[in-house]
Image: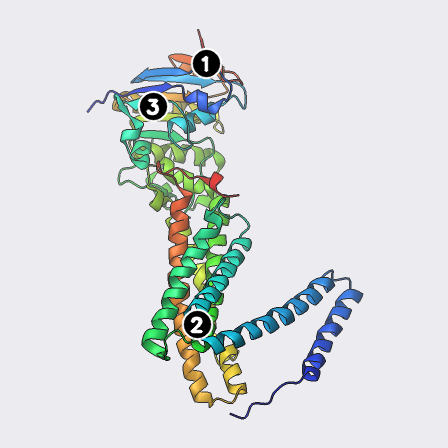
Amino acid sequence: MSLISLIDVHSLASGLFPGSRQHLTLDLAGPGCLGLTGPSGSGKTLLLRAIADLDPSGGTVKIDGQDRTSFTGHAWRRRVGYLPAESSWWSDRVGDHFITDNVYGLGQLGFTDDVLDWSVTRLSSGERQRLALSRLLSCAPDVLLLDEPTASLDPARTANVEELIADYGQARQAPVIWVSHDAAQLKQVAQRTILLNGSGHARELS
Amino acid sequence: MNMITLSALDLGLAATLVLVVALISWRMHLGNTSQILLAAVRTTLQLLLIGLVLKALFAATSPIWIALMSLVMLLAAGREVMSRQKRRFSGSWGYSLGTSSMFISSFGITVLALLLVVEPQPWYQPRYAIPLLGMLLGNTMNGIALALDNLTHNAWERRSAIEGRLTLGMTWSEAITDLRRDSIRVGMIPIINAMAIAGLVSLPGMMTGQILAGSPPVEAVKYQILIMFLIAAGTGFGTISAVLMGCRRLFDERERLRLDRLR
C-alpha cells in the first residue's frame, strides 16, 4: 500500500522565535528527505517538537491536506513519528517499549529478536539509539521527524540506519525530516537541506 | 466519668521538658532551637484558642457557625496541602486541586457518618461533627499532599519518559499510567500503615483520649475502629480524585505534557 503524505509547516516558527519576521514554510510531498541543519540553539529540535505537537506553537501543519487539529493529539503523533535525540526508556525490558505487535527492522539494525528480552540497563548508547528507531518505525508512522538519529553510532551502524530509513520512506511513501549537525551526511541522505540560524531565519542550501 | 483535671502547674512541668530539649538543641548547634520554641508556643496558643471556640460552638449548636468553622478548617487544610508540595500547580489550581478533593472526601464522609452511623440529634451537633471532620481532614490532607507531591515531582523528573510515550502515539492517560498508580499508592501508605499497626505499636490518639477521659476501653475501641475506616475511605477517595484531576491538568487539550503549569 502506498500512501502519499504531504506536510506543510507554516509559520510554526513565529511561535518559536519571538520577533522573527520570517515565516517558515515547508512543503514535503513524500517520499523524500528534507535535511535540517544549523548551529546549536537554532531551534531545530523545537521545530520538530512543534510539528509533532509536543509544545504549543503557532502555524498550521497538515498531513494529506488534513489539519492536525482535526486529529486528537495521540492520533496525530501516531502518524507523525518523532524520534528525539535522546531516547527514553521506562520499563526494565526492551520489548515492553514496543507497543505494537509488529517489530520493524531489528535484523537490519544488527539485532536478533531476543533483544526484546534484554534489560534496558545493559544497552549501550548506540544500541539505545537504534532500538528507539526500531520502536518508532514499529508504530508505522506516515511521516518521520528524526533528531540526530545517528549521533552515537559508528560509521558501519550509521550506514545501516541510513539505509533502513530510506527503505522505510520508500515502502511507506513517507516523507522524512532529518535533523543533523553533519552537513556531509545530509548531502547524502536528503534531497533538500534547510539551514536555520539562531534568529529564526531559514534558507535553503543548494 | 472520673476524669482528673490538669492544672496549669501540670502543663508547666511538661513545658519545662520541652525547654530542656530546646536548651540541648541550642548547646549542640542543631539550628532548630527557635523552631522548637515557636512550635511549642503555637501549639499552646492554637489549642487554647480552639478550646474556647469549641466551648462557644458547643453552647450554641448553630448550623451557621458550625458551617463557618468547617470552612475555616477546610481552607487551612487546603493551604497546608499546597505548601507541602515542592512543585505545585501554578495559579488557582495549586490551591483548589487539593482543597476540592478534601471537600469531596472529608465533608462527604463526615456527613455520611453523622447521618447514618453516629446519628446524634441534631445530626450536625458540633460535639460530634467538628472532631470527626477534623480527624478526617487531617488525615486526608496527609494523603493528598503526599500523593500530589509525588505526582508533580515525578512528572517533572520523568518528563522524557512521559513524552517518550507520547511520541509513540500513546494517549495522555496511557503515558502517565504508572505515575498515576504510584502517586495514589503513596497517598494511601500512611493510613494503611496506621490501620496495620493500630493497637500493636501505637494506641491511636483519639482512643487514648477517650480512655483518659474515663470511657470504657471497649467503647473507645469501637469509636476508633469507626474512625479508622472513615479515614481510610476518606483518604482513598480524596487521594484518587486529587491524582486523577492532577493528571488531567498536566496535559492540555492536545494531550501535550504541560510542565509549564507547575511552578
Residue drawn at 40 percent across, 35 percent down? A132
Report the residue at 48% width, 69% height from top: B134
Mark 1 packing: few (<14 Cα in 10 Å), some, or many (20+)?
A: some
Query: Are the numbered discs 1 and 3 placed on the same chain, yes or no?
Result: yes
Q: Alpha-carbon distance for marks 1 and 3? A: 17 Å
Q: Which residue is mark 1?
A: A22
Residue at image coords 39%, 71%: B230
Of B259 and B105, which appears nearest the observer?
B105
- Most foreground residue, B208 or A78: B208
Q: CA distance from mark 1 to mark 2?
A: 68 Å
Q: Is residue A155 visible?
A: no
Task: Say which of marks 3 and 2 sits in front.
Answer: 2
Residue for badge 2: B62
Q: Amino acid at mark 2?
A: Ser
Q: Which element type, helix, strand or loop, lies under badge 2? A: loop
Residue B258 percent coordinates (x, y): 44, 39
- How busy is the neighbourhood of tag 2: few (under 14 within 10 Å), some, or many (20 plus)? few
Residue A182 on image: x %, y % = 49, 18
Q: Which mark is residue B251?
A: none
Q: Would you name the residue on which mark 3 appears?
A: A61
Taking the view exactly as shown, the residue that stands out farthest to the top is A206
The quadrant where residue A158 appears: top left
Q: In the figure, A181 relative to A203: above or below?
A: below
Mark 1–mark 3 CB contact (< 8 Å): no
Q: Which chain is home to disc 1?
A: A
Residue A67 visible in rendering: yes
